[in-house]
Image (tube, helix red, strand yellow):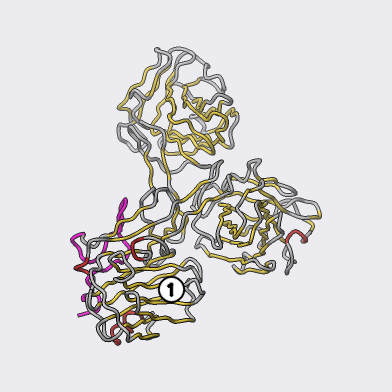
Amino acid sequence: MSTYDDASLILIPSGVKDGKVYSAKPTNGDGDFTFTRASEATRLVDGVVTKVRTNSLKMSNTLDNYRWTHPDPTTTVLGGQTDRSGGSTAWKITKTAAWDRIDQSLSPTVLGITTLSVYAKKGATDWMYFRADEVTYIYEASFDLATGAVGATANLISSSISDAGGGWWRCSLTFNATGAGASVVRMYPSNADTSAGASGTSGSLYIQDFQLEDGLVSTPYIATTTIAVSEGPVANMPRLNSVAGGCPSLLLEPQRTNLITQSEYIGSSYWDKKTSTVTGGHISPIGQLNAYKVVEGSLDGLQWIESSQVSTAAGDLTLSLYVKSAERTKIGIRDGISGAYATFDLSLGTVLDNSAGTDGGVESLPNGYYRLTLTITSGTSIFYALYILSDTYVSGAPSDHTYQGDGTSGIYIYGAQAEEGSYATSYIPTYGTAATRVQDACSKTGISSLIGQTEGTLFVETESLINGIGCRFTLSDGTISNRVSIEWDEVPSRIKGFLGSGGNTSADGYDQTDRLKIALTYNASAFKMFINGVLVDTDSSIPTVSGMGRVEFSNYGGVNYPFLGSAHQLLIFTTALSDAEAITLTTL
């Protein structure tokens, strides 16, 4: 019989649903953990960044519903038409007067970077006029459904038409809804390329599957009825991160806010292009065409862009950015106020140089991108500056590195973030305002029968977010007197174990951000800690503990010292494993 067979509770994160992480043992649900996070978030799936997608347009393919109005009574809407998959879910829209159309009033109104899309096919008219309205602007484009071309546009970031097969096209508008925000979506059959929507007094076309979503691109269609529908790591959905070929781990992070208000729309006025230019529509770490290329100028000088000023609290601040080399392989990140910087080599995935008192980091993704980080001690504001560096750069502040640009070479960037704290957390997208991801929390109560009281074993396999993080994992009754806990100490590279209020073990020399296997065993004669296959400490002064029925990724009672990092597995035993068993269990 294996050691795993003897465990009373096994959590190897692989199954989740809204508010729950399933345990592998017991299998009847008694060991399933409760999970909370009151906001959406991002995660890594096989190393690819994945974020929440939401279709906020209601009744997205029910065009005879009350949400869709036909302001001109001569408009007719007929369902049951052949759709793009060979079914019968498409709609025929027929006009018999100049302004015939279908509308949907948006509630709430839409603000920020938004993409509106629909699938369309020509009928008796070749053109579709498509738009979103607000008080200040009309965001609009005409689409030729015969040739697959975009006609006249106004007030858009971009527009696109892509072949969906069988004569169908997906037509998209991307815009920055400002002022009062977009409040109406409108679609008109049209007989010509026009921004008036009134070309011709007869005609028809076929449509299906409207979508309205945050961001610079249209993503795979999500059907809606009476409410908006989201997919991905939404509020209270646990995040299982994974890298290619590896098992997933449960990600637990603190609350953080991305202070950069345009993290993806680098083409906006929020980013001052200085001596460089930018182009959109490049592949990003999420596998979509929403990254930008920063292109150096053709003059001899600095090659850089800079954000608008960002207000911060005094203290540690971490800047991060996803970057991929194009023609250039070196980049610098700098705070334009303090001058703190780090420079990076994208061909090697290394930090080249950094200013005194700062810390630069590199995380590799499988699609050629790196996430670069710079941690600084900020004042009350920063300017987030990005520099392209030539191949001759070796060291020094990027703001001192000038060279003759060729006007075409550059780098790809995506996902700028500035967060208060001494380390980077997962990406928080922004589309015009700062955004906050709330802290993750995971626990299980009412399982005293699964926890050894007079003897037992607690085993975890983890990586923390930073070395010296000061967090804990605990079995308890909610008090210090009855608890077994593992502590990733505030002192870097120190791991501690606690039993009740008197049993103590400790070991140094273990970087907390490394993947560690840690076990605590306890019985009437000894309290022992094992790390990565080694018995590292023993305490023979054993306090009595009882009544433990809580398992928490935090201190006892669920307050203070939350575990922050990746949890690969958790095992609980109602008996103290032998030294040999504990060594085997914790061996990497």
Quadrant placement of the C terminus: bottom left
Evaluate whether residue 243 shows in this view: no
Across and down, in percent, residue 224 comes to 35, 36
Give the quarter of the image for residue 387: bottom right
| Residue 57 in view, yes or no | yes
Q: Please tell me which residue lies in front, 404 or 448.
A: 448
Residue occupying the point 69% across, 45% down: 272
Q: Amino acid at mark 1?
A: Arg
Task: Give the main secondary structure, helix, strand or loop, of the magenta stretch.
Answer: loop
* Picture residue at 74% right of the left edge, 54% below the top: 303
Which residue is depicted at the point 19% across and 68% down?
Answer: 449
- In the rendered image, which residue does mark 1 sit on? 515
Task: Give the magenta-colored segment's residue range.
Answer: 1-29
**Residue 405 vs residue 498: left or right?**
right
Element at badge 1?
A: loop
How many discs mark residues in the rendered view? 1
- Location of residue 221 by image quarter: top left
Report x, y in % for residue 93. 39, 22
